[in-house]
């Protein structure tokens, strides 16, 4: 039971070098932004002349942010494993 709870709530945030609450805040922030963008995309679907690049621009920005978070997580795992050096 404890193992399952750790897997669900602790392991992944720890893998990426974050606390549970920090990871929750980041994921909830991305979720809120995606919900907003979903509404804007629906508005654009109904009226194509509105918000022509809003969603695609925001998704590109979010992709860059997510890549940066992934790089940070990779660095955290590398440090924890005791591996250091270029190319890792």
Image (cartoon, rainbow, N blue to C red):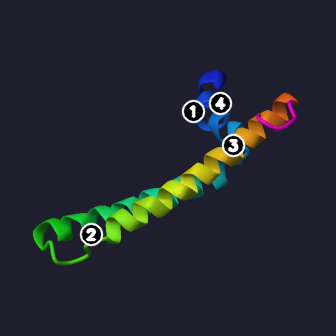
Who is closer to the viewer here, 17 or 66? 66
The residue indicated by pointer 1 is 8
Q: Earlier in the sequence, mark 2 or mark 1?
A: 1
Q: Residue furthest left?
A: 46
The span from disc 3 to disc 1 (Cα, nearest Å) is: 18 Å
The answer to whether residue 23 is visible is no
Asked whether, in this view, residue 14 is left or right of residue 60, the answer is: right
User: Is residue 78 visible in this depiction of the protein?
Assistant: yes
Asked whether, in this view, residue 74 is left or right of residue 5, the answer is right
Count of numbered labels shown in the rendering: 4
Q: Is residue 44 left or right of residue 14?
A: left
Q: Residue at x 70, y 39 (%)?
A: 74
Element at badge 1? helix
Q: Residue at x 44, y 60 (%)?
A: 60
| Front of the two marks 3 and 1 | 3
Q: Which residues are magenta?
A: 83-88
Labels 4 & 2 near each other (Cβ < 8 A): no
Query: Disc 3 to disc 2, how far (Cα)?
Result: 31 Å
Badge 3 or badge 1: first in the primary sequence:
1
Vertical arrangement, residue 67 with respect to residue 43, above or below = above
Q: Is residue 80 above or below residue 71?
A: above
The reply to whether the magenta stretch includes residue 37 is: no
Instruction: Work out whether 71 lies above or below 5.
Output: below
The residue to which callout 3 is attached is 73
Image disc number at residue 40: 2
Image-quadrant location for residue 5 = top right
Which badge, 3 or 2, is on the more N-terminal residue?
Answer: 2
Name which residue lies at 15% across and 65% down.
Answer: 45
User: CA gap, disc 4 to disc 2?
Assistant: 37 Å
Residue situated in front as seen by the camera: 87 or 1: 87
**Horizontal and vertical percent position of residue 35:** 35, 61
State yes or no: discs 4 and 1 in contact (Cβ < 8 Å). Answer: yes
């Amino acid at each position: 039971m404890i193992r399952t709870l750790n897997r669900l709530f602790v392991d992944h945030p720890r893998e990426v070098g974050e606390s549970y609450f920090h990871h929750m805040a980041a994921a909830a922030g991305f979720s809120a932004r995606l919900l907003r963008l979903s509404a804007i995309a629906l508005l654009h679907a109904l009226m194509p002349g509105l918000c022509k690049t809003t969603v695609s621009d925001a998704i590109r920005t979010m992709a860059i942010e997510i890549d940066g978070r992934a790089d940070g997580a990779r660095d955290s795992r590398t440090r924890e494993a005791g591996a250091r050096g270029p190319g890792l």
